[in-house]
Image (tube, grey):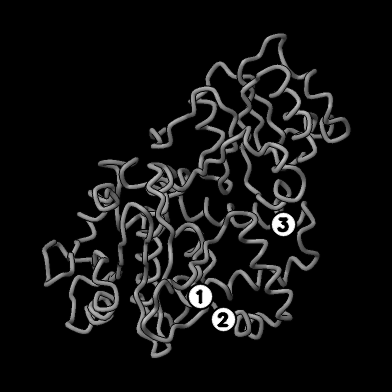
Amino acid sequence: MYDRILSPPAKQSFFLLGPRGTGKSSWVRSAYPKATYIDLLGDDTYRRLLARPESLIDFLPNTPSTVILDEVQKVPAILNEVHRLIERKKIQFILTGSSARKLRKQGVNLLAGRALTHSLFPLTARELGSDFNLPRALKFGLLPMAVTSENPKKYLEAYVKTYLKEEIEQEGLTRQLGSFARFLEVASFSQASVLSVAQIATDSQVHRKVVEDYFSILRDLLLSYELPVFSKRAKRELMTKRKFFFFDVGLFKTLRPKGPLDSDAELNGAAFETLCLQELLALNHYQDRGYEFFHWRTRKHQEVDLVMYGENGFLAFEFKSSSRLREADFETLRLFGQDYPQAKLHLVFGGNESRMYGNIHLLAARDFFADCEAILKP
């Protein structure tokens, strides 16, 4: 098991949210080895607490100091009892969850001010250290089991089926599982691209309103990110559509059908951008850097892949998987720098040499993943 960057809060209760397979259960049990552990995925425990959430106290020893409730969204009504026990017994609760939908609708606000919220992401290059393998990460992503499995392809295929069956079908999030599966395939073509809901509805042969609901499901299950357009003090006419990402390269690659018309450059470009984004999102959260994430795209289709903005800085990134760059590859970053001279400009690419190129910091991929923490420092 790899050491994770996330530091456990000492005494306060908290939610730990993240997609299935990111290692939440392993992390909480390692970080809190003496805690009382209750797994709500266990059939008997689930049935008993679903029927009588107030019976939670019966599962606890006489004087528990810390209690782990794993996959708490399975019984969201239990949060009423958690709230009571935090108040009256001063118990620290660690509440893991892989779905924000039920928590948001049925009780998370009851713990406002009494429980922090943390997230767990796929593994990062820093956590992997010398085991980080860029070509493998671009192919299979960085879910812990995909990293350690002897057959990551089979694991990822099973992962997709598990989500379709357990999270979508069993939770009743959609009655048309076939339509949702077709939607996932079509959505994979939008990875690292501006999102067109209308086009995806047409291609997946599903009504637009249904597609909007499907994207909502992805967000609620923490399976995707959507980056809004950066428009602060805009000097140009901008597009308004968001940019879409499945949360992990391995998931994207597993969902994305590949045929004779698909070029490696197209797939590798989206995978490279996704992997870089994964690293930045995770480190920004774990180290509490406070950046918000955007993309920038003008009506003339001039685009910067990622903009990070916050009290600690203003960063702009272009991601190019190729080892060779052309002068045209720098044009939109230069344009963005003209509009926002305060921004630090970075171009991350698949080559080997990092250096300054005018006012643009040219970063070889190996250096980006090795020094990503330093990039985020004020």
Q: Is mark 3 on a helix, strand or loop?
A: helix
Residue 217 falls left or right of residue 312: right
Kind of residue sitting beneath label 3: Ile
Looking at the image, which is closer to me, 139 or 339? 339
For residue 302, above or below residue 280:
below
Q: Is mark 1 on a helix, strand or loop?
A: loop
Are the two marked residues, 3 and 1, in contact with CB atoms closer than 8 angstroms?
Answer: no
Residue at 80% across, 30% down: 44
Residue 30 % position (x, y): 49, 25
For residue 270, above or below residue 103:
below
Badge 3: residue crowd in 10 Å (few <14, some 14–19, many ≥20):
some
- Mark 2, residue position: 196
Are the two marked residues, 2 and 3, in contact with CB atoms closer than 8 angstroms?
Answer: no
Measured in 3D between alpha carbons, the distance from the residue under mark 2 to the one under mark 1, in whole angstroms, is 8 Å
Residue 163 % position (x, y): 65, 54
Measured in 3D between alpha carbons, the distance from the residue under mark 3 to the one under mark 1, in whole angstroms, is 21 Å
Kind of residue sitting beneath label 1: Ser
Measured in 3D between alpha carbons, the distance from the residue under mark 2 to the one under mark 3, in whole angstroms, is 23 Å
Residue at 49% across, 64% down: 252
Looking at the image, which is closer to me, 258 or 185? 185
- Mark 3, residue position: 168
Sequence-wise first label, 3 or 1 = 3
Sequence-wise first label, 2 or 1 = 1
> What quarter of the picture does the N terminus occupy?
top left
Residue 135 falls left or right of residue 355: right
Mark 2 or 3, closer to the camera: 2
The residue furthest top is 62
Sequence-wise first label, 2 or 3 = 3
Mark 2 or 1, closer to the camera: 2
- Mark 1, residue position: 190
